Image (cartoon, rainbow, N blue to C red):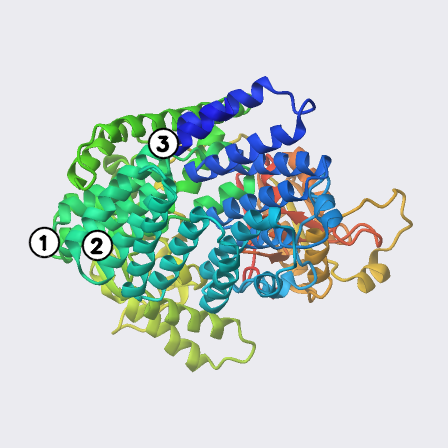
Amino acid sequence: RMNLAALAEETGNAAEAMQEYRSALAELPANIAPNLSAEILDNLGRLEGHAGLFNPGESAQRKAAELYAREGNCDGVRRALSILGSILIEVGSTEDAEAYLSAALQRDCQSLIFLSEPAAQKADLTWAGDRASRAQSNAPHPAAVDSCRRIPHLPESADAALFRALIALSDAASLAGDAQSSFKCLQAAHAYISTPRRALRLANALGSYFLDQDDALQARQWFTRALVDADQAELPLTHEGRGVAHLGLAQSALQSRDLTAAADQAARALKLACARGDAGQIISALRTIAAAQLARGEHAVALRALQLAAALIERVPIGELDAETRATYLATQHGVFEELIDLLIASAGEDTAHANANAVWQALTESERGRSRALQYARNQTDENVETLGAYAGKQSSAYQEMLQRLALTSAAAGPETNWEAALAALEQTLSPSQASHDVLSADRFLAELKRLDATFIEFASGRELMYAFICDESGVHVVKLGKRAAINGAATALSTLLRASESAATDVALSARRVAELVLWPLSARLGHKRLLIAPEEMLHFIPFAILPWAQQQKGLVLHQVELAMVPSAFFLTARNPPPRSGKPSFELFGDPVFGLTRWRLDCFRPRTQPPVGESLSVRSVAQWSDSLPPLPASRSEVLGIEALARRSWPSVAVAVHLGCAATAQALRQAETHHADVLHIATHGFVDARRPRLSALILTRESAEISGNGIFSLFDMLATANPARIVVLSACDTSAGR
């Protein structure tokens, strides 16, 4: 079966190769031949990662590393960790990726084996000491960059894993915008190109590097060199490296405005990617075809290509991804939706009576697809019976793999390699609209809800460079081009900074608010005539209070003086089915004024420990170190007591549980789930790690001196909590900034 899998992979049939590897695993108990089982697992995981099956791919690599470690196989561990790091880069978990890749480069075999044992993957292979200070930065950790500069002397058998790790570290540095470090990793990888296959991969990596530097000439030279290396290695036409090279040639041709070559090379890459079931490369090829056709003025063709890319993105079975990977994936791939919005709005025309209403509505629905994927997923989770979620996710995954197999078959019948029209038609046959996985926003239902609310709805949406506003009421939908994203985000950032500064002059705040209003509110004034105003913000607009913006250029009043204002996540939110209201009085769980820092906790809350200390991972420790330095939040006590008083005045016998100071613990928040409160209010500091989402947390009062991390309510706690509260308030003045 391994031979059949290898043959299928060589001929570009990734779906068949994955099936053969799975069959081999089913027939071979891991305890019979651990090394062989590990080899099968890391081949399977590599293919699953390319196919977009991120969670199975990651799981396979972890199991492979564990089996290799059990057998003392250092080279195998290096290989599994290098592939695991590559998969994590695909979904944007760059710091996890850097950790595993740097571990793959270390010399000490025993340490490497320890890190790959079952409990090792529990302890984060990361640099815990300063993660908190880097959480707001995209820069790669210096240790990851140093790994590319100081490669230990290792046996030749480790070359393949070292090479793969260096290429992946280059990718991580590139994603972080560190071109210099990216190039240093590629230079280091040059020492390990002992085979034509590695030469092919390095040539493709160098081509991608020069593409990022807008050097189309050098990029084209390296991608051409990659195809020569593929010929020398006698690789089949469907080999992954050839597809990467053709896509790179398409993108370099696009940079140099050779539109015919760009479309032809992208079509070739698309067909090869379909044959292999490589979802990421299919999406990239479709975007390149769209860009080439748009530059030619072929808007309809560009629209077809981008809509197919969006349809494929939505087929990835996120229901079976683990919590962190799912959160990261949902935050990616926005580029496709941004390009769709630009294209549809351009075809709709400006905000005039002659604008194409259908195109405007279609642009809004594409904006909704991009912004509300997480919300739709959450709704699907609540709609499904909890006991059947696992089976539901399994069906999603199976359907996705069947779709990849159909793609390979339709691609084979799509005609000449450079026929992009045939390639798009073949994809449309497989990704038919009837199979769409997203809920379509109903115009009738949405506009009727706005009429019922007597409301105007504004949804801000980003294109590649511009920001737009969709303005909706019962009469229909209109769109206004507001201006450059950078200018709008800059103005919003300036206002947010002034509002949070302790000594800002009122005149400075007023001028800054006026500047934001000039950019995002006043261009819409003619259409704001209803009692309520509902706003779905975008980017930095999330961080400003629209209520304090001046309502109009010639009037002194603010927004809060003119309309009832509410912020909403999306238009989809307004049409989603709501649970029936509960009968009787509401109940409340209120948390505030936690005790931060060990010294203050000892003074205010210390009590003898009644339970033995529990070990903690490096990741928990690093967040805890940050939390110990946080300033207290005494005003949050007044806030919570004020809410309690208001609730008791409104409902004299209402149930209100108040957790303040020493009582505002993470354990109390976990237990609140069982109290079935209607309103859960939490006023505390938050920690957000954009590079490793699972480390994000709410910081509450610790319960012991021995366990530094026990005051942390982590992302995993949140995801594991089935809290039935109808309203959850995370009270914040500056989210995740520690103020």
Residue 715: image tag: none
* Residue drawn at (45%, 61%) of the image: 174
At numbered mark 1, what does the secondary structure look like: helix, strand or loop? loop
User: Distance from label 1 to label 2 (Cα)?
Assistant: 11 Å
Label 1–label 3 contact, CB within 8 A: no
Q: Amino acid at mark 1?
A: Ala
The residue beneath circle 3 is 11
- Res. 515 image quadrant: bottom left
At numbered mark 3, what does the secondary structure look like: helix, strand or loop? loop
Q: Which badge, 1 or 3, comes first in the chain's sequence?
A: 3
- Res. 256 image quadrant: bottom left
The residue beneath circle 2 is 479
Residue lying furthest left in this view?
A: 354
Q: Residues within 10 Å of mark 2 (few under 14, many from 20)?
A: many
Determine whether, in the image, residue 234 is placed left or right of residue 581.
Answer: left
Q: Residues within 10 Å of mark 3 (few under 14, many from 20)?
A: some
Q: Amino acid at mark 3?
A: Thr
